[in-house]
Amino acid sequence: MKLLLTKYVLFSLGISILMVGCEFGVKKSPETLSVQDTPFIQETHDAYPVGTGSDENEVRSIALDKESNVWIATAAGVFRMRSGSRQWEPVTTDENRGPAYSVAMKSDGTILIGTWNGLYSWSQNQLHKEENIEPPISVICTSGKEAYALGPNGIWQQSEQGWILLNYSVARSVRCAATDGKGSLWVGTDAGIYLCKNGKQELYQSTQELISAYVRAVNFSPEGLCWVGTMGGISIRKDEKLQKKITPADGLSNSFVNCVEPAGDGTMWVGTELGVVRFGTNDKPSLRFSRRWLLNDRVNDIAFDTSGNAWIATNGGVSCIRRNHMTLAEKEQNFYGQLMRRHIREPWTCGSVYLVNAGDTASWVHEDDDNDGEYTGGYLAMESFRYAVTKSEDAHTKARKAFDFLCQLQTVTGTAGFFARSIVPPDWTRVHDSNRSYTPQQIAEELVKDPRYKPVEQRWRPSVDGKWLWKGDTSSDEMDGHFMAYFYFYEYAANDAEKQLVRNHVKKIVDELIRNNYNLIDIDGTHSRWGVWSPKQLNDDPDWASERSLNSMELLGYLKFAYGITGDEKYQQEYLRLINEEGYLENARKVNDKNPAWQIYFDRTLEGYTFPLLFRYETDLKIKAVYEEMLEKWMNDQEFGENLINNLAYTLCTGQKINVQQTIDFLRDTPLDLVEWPINHTFREDVRIVRSPILEEIQIDQLPPASMRATVRWDKNPWSAIQGNLHAMREPVFWLWPYWEAKFLGIIQ
C-alpha cells in the first residue's frame, strides 16, 4: 500500500484537507468534495386528533376550503377546524349527526358533504341539505365546474337545475370516483372500475386491465395518467389502456391502496393500510408511516393546502405533514436549542430524557443511562468541533464543562483510576439497574447463559461527600467513549493548560490499567463485567475470543494516545510489548473478520472511535500500514455509508472525503422531532426480513432513511426491523456532532 504520510495533515489544528489517492475500492467522493448549505425541504408532523372516541377519529375523507379551513368526514359525523385553530367543530348535529363518508370543495368554494342521510352543501356559512338524492352518499368528486355524488343507490351530477340522477348501470359497491373535467367519470367498485361517458359505461376488471377488481382509489396525475388503487397495488392507465403497475416490489409499503392524490410538485401520494408512499418522476419512493408521521398508519384520504402541506385522514385522526424551507445552519440552531433546553443535566451530563406519559413531550424528566459517559463524550466531541470551526468561547466553555464531568466520573469513585458509568443526585428515586440481591439459583441461571457473568448487587454507591450516587461496573465501550472524547477535546478545543489536564487524567486511567494487567478493576477488587483487555483473558480464555480483536485494538489505541500526548516511554514500551509478545496487532488486524456470531453493530462505532487515536500518533510505517489496511477494509464493509461518525472518522484519518452525499442526505432528512417513536418495519411488504449485516438481529434488507428510523444513535443498528421507545426523547448530538465535524472537514460550505 502506498499512502503518503502527508495525508494525515487533518490532525493538525488547521482545517485544510489534502486529498490523497488510495488503492482500495471504497466510495470516495471526488465528484462531490463539498456541498453548499442551500435551503432544502424539512418535513414535520403536526397531529390533530378529533376527539376521544374511535368513531370521531376514524377520518374517512378530508378537504380544505379557500380560507384554509379543514373539513373532515368521520364515522361520527362531519367536523370543521378553522384556519389557525386546533379545535374541531361539529357541522352536522342533532338528528342529522351520524356516519359521514366524503367531503369535497367545488370550484366556487362550496363544500359538499356525503353522509348517511344524504348530501349537504356548505356555502356562505350555512349548511343546506340537497334535494332529490337518495342516501347514503359515500363518494363525492369534483373537477372544475363538474360535481358528482355517488352511493349504493345511484350517481347524481349537479346541473343548473339541481342534482340529476344519471342513467349509468354500475355495481352498487361504489368506493371512489374521479372526473377528468371533460365529461368522463371513473367509478371504482368491488367489481372493477367503470368509465362512464356520454350515457354509457364500460367496465374494466380483468387482470390485463387492473391488478385486481377491488378498486378503492382513482385519480389523475399531472400528466393525465389515470392512477387506479386496488387490492394489490396501483394500475396506471393511459388512453383507457393499462400502462404500468406499482406493487410492493416497486416500493409500495402495503398492497391495499385506499387513496391517491397528486401534490402540487407533481408527486403522487398513495395512501395505504400502512402509511403513505410518495412517487415522483425521478426519485425513489418515499414512505411515511408510524406515529412519527401519522396518528394512524391507515391512510384514507389526502388533501393539500396552498403551501403544499399534506393533510392526511387516518383512522386515528388528522395528520399534517408540513413542508418548510430550511438550511443545515438553521437546523443546527433548532437542534442545539433543544439540546440545551432539555438534554443537559447537572453537573454537565448529556443524555436522553424520559417521557412519563408515553409520547408526551411535556412530561419529560431527566434519567440516567449506562452510557452517560460515552454519550457525554459524543457531546464533548461535538463542542470541540464547534469550537474548531467557530472559535466560539461558548463552545469552548461547554466543552470544558463536559470534560470536567468525565473527570468527575473518576474522582467520585475515590479510586486511583476506576471511573463510574454515571452519577445522579442522591434524591433520585428512579434509576436504571437499581441495587438488588441475587439468589444462588439466579446466579446459576446467568452463569449457564454466560460464564463471564458478574452479579453486581450494589451498582449505585453514594459519593464520599454525599452529593452524588455513582454507578459502577463500567464497561469497555464506556472506556472507548471517554478516550474518543479526550482525543477530540485535546486536539481541537483544549488550551495549553487544559491539555495538561487531559494528560494527567489519561495517565491516571492508563496507569491503573497497567497496574491491573489491563483489566478495569471495580471498587469490589474484581474487573467489571466487560472491562477486560488482559492478554490472559483475550488470548487464553476461549470465552473471551469474541472480544479479542476489538479489545486488542482498543487497548493499543489507549496506549498510543497516552504516549502521543504525554511522551512517557512506558506507554510506548507497553504498546510494543503487547504487539511483539502478545500478538495484539495481529489480533486487531482481524477486527473486520470476526465470526458472524460475535459481530454486533455497536462494535463498528467503537472501532470508529478508536481509529483516529491510532492514526494520529503512530509513526512506525509498518505498523501504520496495518492500520491502513484495517481501515480500508472496515470502510469497504460499510458500503452504504450509513454511519456518519465512521464516514468522518475515515476522512479525519486519511484526508479522503467519502460518502459525502450520504452524509448530506442524512443531515437533511433527519426529523426535528426527537421522540423515539416506535417503527415496526416487519409490517411492510416492500422489504424483506433478513439476518444481515448482523446475524444476531432481525433486520430489513433496505437501509431506512433517517426519517424512517427511530431517533438515531450511532451505536444502534439502523437496519433493525423493530425500533423505538415511546418513553424516550433522545439528545440531538447524533446530528450535531457530524454536522460540526463535516463543517470542520470542509464537507459543508
Image (cartoon, rainbow, N blue to C red):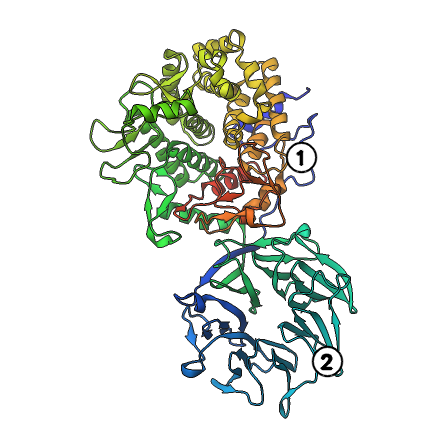
Q: Which mark is residue 183?
A: 2
Question: Which of 191 and 108 lies nearest the eye of the viewer?
Answer: 191
Q: Residue at x 39, y 22 (%)?
A: 447
Total numbered badges shown on the rendered structure: 2
Sooner in the amino-acid sequence: mark 2 or mark 1: 1
Q: Residue at x 48, y 47 (%)?
A: 332
Question: Which of 534 and 514 lies nearest the eye of the viewer?
Answer: 534
Residues packed near mark 2 inside 10 Å, few (<14), some (14 to 19) or many (20 plus): few
Give the side of residue 26 with respect to residue 734, left or right.
right
Q: CA distance from mark 2 to mark 1?
A: 54 Å
Expressed as whole percent of the image width and height from the top left, the position of residue 588 reads 55, 18
Placement of 404 over or under 711, stated as above or below:
above
- Identify the residue position indicated by label 1 in the image: 27
> Which residue is at the far bottom?
161
Q: Secondary structure at mark 1?
A: loop
Q: Residue at x 41, y 47 (%)?
A: 729
Amino acid of disc 2: Gly
Q: Are marks 2 and 1 in contact (CB under 8 Å)?
A: no
Expressed as whole percent of the image width and height from the top left, the position of residue 641 reads 60, 37
Q: Secondary structure at mark 2?
A: loop
Expressed as whole percent of the image width and height from the top left, the position of residue 482 reads 41, 28
Quadrant position of the C terminus in the picture: top right
Q: Residue at x 41, y 20 (%)?
A: 452
Amino acid of disc 1: Lys
> Which residue is at the far left?
465
Placement of 225 over or under 501, stated as above or below:
below
Give the side of residue 368 with respect to residue 583, left or right.
left
Placement of 565 over or under 255, stated as above or below:
above
Front tag of 2 and 1: 2
